[in-house]
Amino acid sequence: MKLLISNDDGIYALGIRTLANALAEAGHDVTVVCPDRERSATGHGLTLHQPIRAEIVASIFHPTIKAWACDGTPSDCVKLALWALLDSPPDLVVSGINQGANLGTEILYSGTVSAAMEGMIEGIPSIAMSLTSHTYKNFQPAAHFAKTLIAQLSVKPIPDLMLLNVNVPPVNWEEIAGVQLTRQGVRRYVDVFDKRIDPRGKTYYWLTGEVLEDVEPPAGLNLEQNFPIDVNVIRDNYISITPLQYNLTYGNALDKLSNWEFNFS
């Protein structure tokens, strides 16, 4: 398959090198276009008020891989690749492997998911791959699963236009319990702004915080209740696959609000 790979951890991140090299070694036609530095938690931001530059990168990846480092956001990278750098559209956009989870409400901030989402917006099925640890460095199990999943998709494509948000537990391949299709959960954080003083006496704030709890999404979202939520299956060492779409319309709300009357007098 012809694959476009991006990320939000930057061109030198171990996760993207492991993923891209594994897929190239499996015989896929791989192009990498990703940020020239870490751009985590940038969401779906685009660069509009300054030029975007992309430089060819050599000797980091497998010799068959064409790679560019872009000074824009993850979404910029995919958009630039699709409209300017590639000679033809890819069969699949893959983002990752991210260092850290993209579970529950984290996906709203994720540059990894947004890069994949950009592919889906352009009509290309996409995958976001994440390793659910900020410290665990063995990306091989996640890369192995990506290779297996893409081989399966080359035979049996994704049935509709969607994004598969894949999270892999931080354990050896032998310790992975299996794969489960999941619903997006809700991950609540305690957000703390650490107030500090810089050397010139100016006040600044540093966002910190930690996960407070993982909870079920509201029942009114009309989700399939017989599928587990993503944040739960990871705890049991299952790989989580959550299908996502970009349409955020709250369907049930249209019925609930349909009896509203709007007075323009």
Image: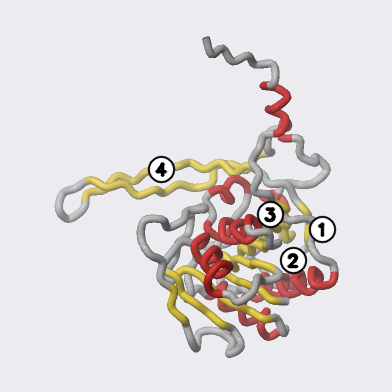
Q: In terms of sequence position, does the residue under pointer 3 or pointer 1 come before the other?
A: 1
Q: Are marks 3 and 1 in contact (CB under 8 Å)?
A: no
- Identify the residue shown where x is 68% and y is 38%: 217
- Picture coordinates of residue 98, whole percent (x, y): 57, 65
Q: Measure the C-alpha gap from mark 1 to mark 2.
A: 26 Å
Residue position marked by numbered label 3 in the rendering: 235
Decide which of tag 4 and tag 3 comes sooner along the chain.
4
What is the CA distance from the residue labelled 2 to the residue labelled 4?
Answer: 34 Å
- Compared to residue 256, the image places residue 163 above or below, namely below
- Residue assigned mark 2: 176
Residue at 62% x, 72% y: name it.
Answer: 4
Q: Mark 4 highlights which residue?
A: 192
- Residue where numbered disc 1 is placed: 159
- What residue is rendered at 19% in x and 48% in y? 202
Circle 4: is it few (<14), some (14-19), or many (20+) Cα within 10 Å?
Answer: few
Query: Mark 1 or mark 2, which has the lower sequence index?
Result: 1
- For residue 234, side relative to residue 36 (left or right): right
